[in-house]
Amino acid sequence: MAARSGVLDVFVVGSCMMDLVSFTPRLPRPGETIHGNRFITGFGGKGANQCVQASRLGATTAILAKVGQDNFGESYIKNLKENNVNTDFVSQTDGVSTGVAQITVDEEGQNSIVIVAGANLFLRPEDVGRLEEALVSSKVLVCQLEVRPETTARALRFARRHGVKTILNPAPATEDMDPELYDLADILCVNETEAEILAKQPVRNVEEAETVALSFLKHGCQAAIITLGPSGCVVAHNGDPTPHHVPSRSVQVIDTTGAGDSFVGALAFYLARRPDLELVEIARRACMVAAVSVTARGTQSSYPYRSSLPDVLF
Ligand SMILES: Nc1ncnc2c1ncn2[C@@H]1O[C@H](COP(=O)(O)OP(=O)(O)OP(=O)(O)O)[C@@H](O)[C@H]1O
Ligand SMILES: *[C@@H]1O[C@H](CO)[C@@H](O)[C@H](O)[C@H]1NC(C)=O
């Protein structure tokens, strides 16, 4: 059953995308038609991914998102419901397609991707205005940058004003990100590539990640987390001059797609449900959840449920 508003742990303002994945012997050249071996669809979009992971861990969740009035939109809403996500704030926009990512993967695992944001770009600041009652009583707001930045900014500003904790995953990252967004983030969470783009300096190892995480605090966020794939993550927060490295468990890697979103979703879950835990411990547990997600294929299809995880994580 969907959660009633008023008791939400995690509210996400963000994207829904259908992944359309073709597996081919090699990538096509311009003007060329080739035959693939296999085709699958998957549910993606950073906003929805993070929301679904938080929900599977047991958080009550809702998402503000837009999809098209098409088959993809219908099936996306159904997918959210099946994941126990409240869809009261998901609407179908007329005359525009659901966001899609057309992905071609060759036999070496190389890919080429075309993203059409579609309905995601129709999510406007006014839409945030309409959900303020639900947002005010949520514990955590999670935002990314796959929808218009002014929509993200409005949601974060509102949450901040009402004491709702904010997580910003500024992805995809741009060099010219609005500096106000740092101030609005209780936790800024990025991967290595995004950290490099934002900080304009290399993040190749734990030490460089620690330096960059500290530099993010100077920009105004309360805490910064940089995820480092198999090396786990680095956590820095205000009032503590020393950053912490949290190693990840070593696992049998099958497919890392969506690991970053699994991490952010788990982070939101713990922040809402275990505010008693230190941020470093929250990050350690989020690493454990994300590490499980790389042991199965796909994006949302690889995200673990609470029932499959050890009790000590809860
Ligand atoms: N090979 C791995 N082994 C163990 N844990 C991993 C591995 N890859 C990712 N993780 C876990 O997932 C978290 C996020 O991974 P990562 O930093 O690669 O994010 P990402 O680059 O945004 O992910 P992706 O782009 O693949 O969706 C890591 O902090 C770690 O906990
Ligand atoms: C970080 O995430 C972006 C998507 O926002 C992705 O394109 C990039 O490959 C990721 N970086 C790493 C090191 O996985």
Image: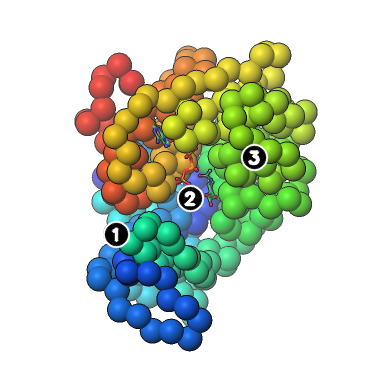
Q: Secondary structure at mark 3?
A: helix
**Mark closer to the observer (1, 2):** 2
Q: Is residue 157 visible?
A: no
Q: Nearer the viewer, residue 202 or 159?
A: 202
Judging from the image, the colouring scheme is rainbow
Residue 54 rendering spot, x and y as whole percentages: 39, 37
Give the quadrant of residue 17. Answer: bottom left
The amino acid on which the numbered mark 1 sits, given as a three-letter code, is Lys
Residue 218's label in the rendered image is none
Vertical side of 127 occupied by 72: above or below: below
Vertical side of 104 occupied by 172: above or below: above
The residue that mark 2 highlights is: 47
The yes-or-no answer for disc 2 within 8 Å of ligand 2 is no
Residue sitting at x 33%, y 62%? 107
The amino acid on which the numbered mark 2 sits, given as a three-letter code, is Gly
Residue sitting at x 60%, y 44%? 193
Q: Secondary structure at mark 1?
A: helix
Give the quadrant of residue 136. Answer: top right
Give the spatial CA distance, label 1 vs label 2: 16 Å
Give the spatial CA distance, label 2 vs label 3: 19 Å
The residue that mark 3 highlights is: 195
The residue that mark 1 highlights is: 78
**Mark closer to the observer (3, 1):** 3
Q: Is residue 275 left or right of residue 312?
A: right
Image quarter of the N terminus: top left
Q: Nearer the viewer, residue 222 or 249?
A: 249
Give the spatial CA distance, label 3 vs label 1: 34 Å
The amino acid on which the numbered mark 3 sits, given as a three-letter code, is Ala
Residue that protrudes farthest toward the left in the picture: 307
The yes-or-no answer for disc 1 within 8 Å of ligand 1 is no
